[in-house]
Amino acid sequence: MQLPTTAQARRAFWQEKLGLARAAYADELARMEQREALYEGTRQVQADPNTRQTPGKLSSNVRNIVYELIESQVDATIPMPRVEAIHPEDEELACRLEDFLRSEAKRLDFTQLNDLQERTVPIQGGGVWQVEWDPEGGFHCSLGALAVRPRHPRCLIPQPGVSEVEDMDYLFLQTSHTKQAIRRRWGKDVSAAAEEEPELRGGGEASEELVTLNTAYYRNDRGGIGLFAWVDNVTLADYEDYQARTRPVCAACGAPKTAEVCPLCGGRKFAASREEDEPLLRDVTLPGGERLGMLAAGPDGRLCQTRIPSYRPGHYPFVVQRNVRRFGAVLGASDVDVVADQQETIKKLGAKIDEKILKGGSFVTLPQGVGVETTDRELKIIRLKNPAEKALIDVLNVQPDPSRERVVLEDNYAWAKSTLGITDAYQGKYDSSAVSGTAKQFSAGQAAGRLESKRRMKNAAFAKLYEMMFRHLLAYARQPVPYTAKTPDGQVRYAHFDPYDFLRRDAAGRLYWNDEFLFTVDPSATLAANREVLWNMIDLKYQAGAFGPVSDPRSQLRLWTLLAAAEYPHAARMRDSFEEQARRQEQTEQGGEAE
């Protein structure tokens, strides 16, 4: 992409691009606001599509079927990574990488992040994951750490006319930050700037303490990823290849910066120079036994720093999780859109039912000039002039019939559920059509089958997310990162993830980073997450004799070993107890054989 030469011209260039992209995306942004309003139970009734007239009053009673149907689909399970090696010699490396990514999912608290996306994705048709490298993060023994953040789709402004993120020449991310946070991260004063897009944080009035950070990501001429960030008219960052490693050099002569003044030419201006390689920080052993030292002899015989190639992720740092794919659309199909008509009708019917019932009641007929006491006394006095006036006193009960409206309301609710493929059995409600446990299980299974596509889209997004995390680790992590993993017998294993383990030398003698792995998700993650079901299944297998005779201590040892691996409470203590019992039994049997 050909960019202007001056910083001011580049900022104007990206500001114009952002304006055009937002204008092209305006209809989708407006629909996002409407979907959020329906999920939150807005009382506003939309205009009639035929007359274009908006009702003058709000609905007095909203049965929020959008909220109910969205919440019925929430899946709290986290798809766990599954890494497969392409080359046989990398199988052990793939297992270690898989264990590390599982540990990172716990450290990053994917449970809370997934809970947020489980609402955003069906409401808006998709959600966005952003993967970054946090140089300030990490443990005491490591510099930097992965950072994964869920972004609302209104924050991501795509290039007009392009539906796949990786096919875009550029895209924009707009986020809200405090002015002090901008100063701490970028070192720039934006106190005079205003918050341009308050809806990015969910709406409300613009805050004097917040600003809108605009970040443009784009493909440079070499296929790398560039970044340009600004607030209002203040440029914060301008990197032609922000995923590349850089070092400050003199802008005049190119000498590396060692002081505030260049020792060669006396220049005081410095620029970031992109490096195609980087120094090796410690001695490593490559596969095959070759030892690569941190220091090596140069052409002149003097020791110098060993250089290795730099790694770049090479992708935009975003993963789009779609609800249901739509051809030619950045996001998928929204569940709110397909039941919006039913929700609007239900709002109108709810208000009409309220009006009928509340305006009904009892009416008293009295002779002219005769009043009735309205006090709380049990016996009330009516003063009549003559006995004939008593016959004129009567009570009329007016009770309107809202049954027709209720029938139509329930019909619309049933249509909405049918559209999304949600049954009563799937929601855990009473289902008169399923008269047995097997029938209920089949009914819920049918609903789950219709929702299978959404689960597949979630699994695909998480697989891509784990791959993106791995690529960022290869690019930026250089110290071993500690993590924990569970062994098959339930024991905790402490280990370190070393990015240098992925350094290789090819047949031509060149060093390269091995990123040739296949990333999917483990289909058993759903069952493993529901430990109570897993425990019951193990118990049934034990009772059926799958572990051996039930009374045999060795069978019980196998049972408690498996339960410990499934994290059954106090199973490890029981396993140790039966292990000792099995050992004594084995010694007794060996002693009997010796005699």
Image: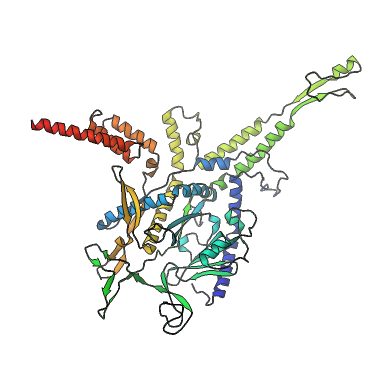
Which quarter of the rendered picture does the C terminus lie within?
top left
Depth check: give the residue in front, 298 or 98. 298
Residue 334 place in picture, x, y as percent: 53, 49
Q: Up-down: is 25 above or below 385?
A: below
Is there any visible trace of residue 494 in the rendered image? yes
x and y, in percent, of residue 276 in the image: 37, 72
| In the foreground, 94 or 478 | 478
Residue 413 appears left or right of 537: right
Residue 411 image offset from top left, x and y in percent = 59, 36
Answer with the quarter of the image where residue 155 lies. Answer: bottom right
Q: Nearer the viewer, residue 426 or 283?
A: 283
Residue 467 figure quarter:
bottom left
Q: Is residue 546 visible?
A: no
The structure residue drawn at horizontal position 47% and vertical position 53%, both measured from the top left corner, is 321
* Placement of 266 over or under 307, stated as above or below: below
| In the rendered image, the vertical position of residue 384 relative to residue 157, given as above or below | above
